[in-house]
């Protein structure tokens, strides 16, 4: 069986109505999402020198049973003409795609994947799978099943190429889907709030906690680097969405909490995330596929955090006098 990317989406308390599905995505969603994104990105880097945009073009062409007009491919991928041209130039230079003149209009460029391109996708797909298994606890049969189901589901987020070949390599398709969704999430949050992706994640987590938290703890809970968390907190304090607090007993401890304005912005962030999930992420998925993705956050990520806490506790209990 091909194991392929976990798309990370998690705590979506999905309440089904007659016409649609409503979500309430919490911070675990983005923990899982970022873990999957990083695993996929590393897999691509280990197996190829292509960037994600170039690889997305290549995998889309692999779905086609005949050459695709370059303009049509750009429309399907939602890419600007210059972006697609640059990606196609790189792929052609590697021998992964071929360009042909259109049958009725010589100005039209028809793109198709070569055998070398297909072989490259197969190679990269294996590297992506290996990276995913290194990130997620797949030695546990239950987690392995969850991961495989989530990968297969996330591969369906981006609509398939109409009239093409049967879908192949879910891990690679999941990679391109997650990158697309991540970019759209960052752009949508920026447009709605003016804040960065990491700033929004910090606001979301503080809103869940409803109490001050140390910056280092926030970074740990969100699986964000301490540097990125500190930068996000700096920006939030400058915006007036958060304030820093200090401990009277521990001068090194720096806490942060939301201001009233930050609480308000948190509601806007949550509404934006939930709407994006409902309209962009889940539109092409069945209820079973959504549930499979949800479990990555609810089950796997939660257990990874529990394992980390257990290791830390074991280390503390093993301490001896210096």
Image (tube, rainbow, N blue to C red):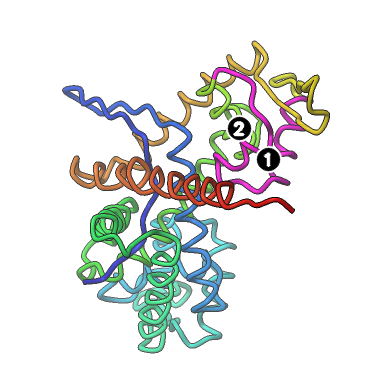
Left or right: residue 131 compared with residue 268: left
Left or right: residue 163 compared with residue 135: left
Q: Which of 36 and 110 is in front in this view?
A: 36
Residue under the image location 36 percent in, 35 percent down:
11
Q: In which quarter of the image is the N terminus?
A: bottom left
Q: Nearer the viewer, residue 176 or 294?
A: 294
Inspect the magenta stretch and tell me whether residue 217 lies in it: yes
CA–CA distance in space, label 1 to label 2: 8 Å
Q: Mark 1 points at which residue?
A: 229
* Residue 187, quarter of picture: top right
Query: Relative to residue 22, is residue 54 depicted above or below?
Result: below
Residue under the image location 53 percent in, 21 percent down:
268
Q: Which mark is residue 48?
A: none
Q: Residue furthest right?
A: 251
Query: Relative to residue 266, is residue 71 depicted above or below?
Result: below
Residue 283: x and y in percent read 29, 40
Q: Which mark is residue 202?
A: 2
Which stretch appears magenta?
210-237
């Amino acid at each position: 069986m091909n194991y392929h990317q976990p798309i990370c989406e998690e705590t979506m308390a999905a309440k089904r109505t007659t016409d649609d599905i409503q979500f309430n995505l919490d911070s675990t969603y983005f923990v899982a999402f970022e873990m999957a994104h990083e695993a996929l990105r590393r897999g691509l880097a280990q197996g190829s020198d292509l960037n994600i945009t170039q690889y997305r073009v290549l995998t889309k062409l692999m779905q086609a049973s005949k050459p695709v007009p370059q303009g049509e491919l750009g429309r399907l991928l939602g890419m600007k003409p210059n972006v697609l041209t640059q990606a196609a130039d790189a792929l052609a230079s590697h021998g992964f795609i071929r360009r042909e003149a259109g049958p009725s209009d010589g100005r039209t460029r028809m793109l198709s994947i070569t055998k070398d391109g297909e072989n490259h996708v197969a190679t990269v797909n294996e590297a992506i799978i290996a990276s995913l298994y290194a990130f997620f606890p797949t030695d546990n049969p239950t987690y392995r099943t969850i991961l495989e189901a989530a990968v297969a589901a996330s591969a369906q987020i981006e609509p398939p190429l109409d009239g093409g070949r049967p879908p192949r390599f879910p891990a690679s398709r999941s990679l391109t889907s997650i990158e697309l969704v991540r970019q759209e999430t960052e752009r949508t949050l920026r447009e709605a709030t003016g804040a960065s992706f990491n700033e929004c994640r910090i606001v979301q987590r503080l809103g869940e906690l409803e109490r001050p938290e140390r910056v280092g703890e926030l970074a740990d809970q969100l699986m964000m680097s301490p540097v990125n968390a500190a930068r996000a907190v700096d920006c939030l304090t400058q915006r007036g969405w958060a304030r820093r607090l200090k401990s009277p007993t521990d001068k090194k401890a720096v806490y942060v909490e939301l201001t009233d304005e930050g609480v308000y912005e948190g509601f806007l962030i949550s509404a934006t995330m939930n709407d994006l999930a409902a309209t962009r992420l889940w539109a092409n998925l069945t209820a079973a596929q959504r549930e499979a993705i949800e479990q990555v956050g609810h089950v796997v990520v939660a257990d990874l955090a529990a394992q980390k806490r257990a290791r830390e506790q074991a280390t503390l209990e093993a301490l001896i006098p210096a």
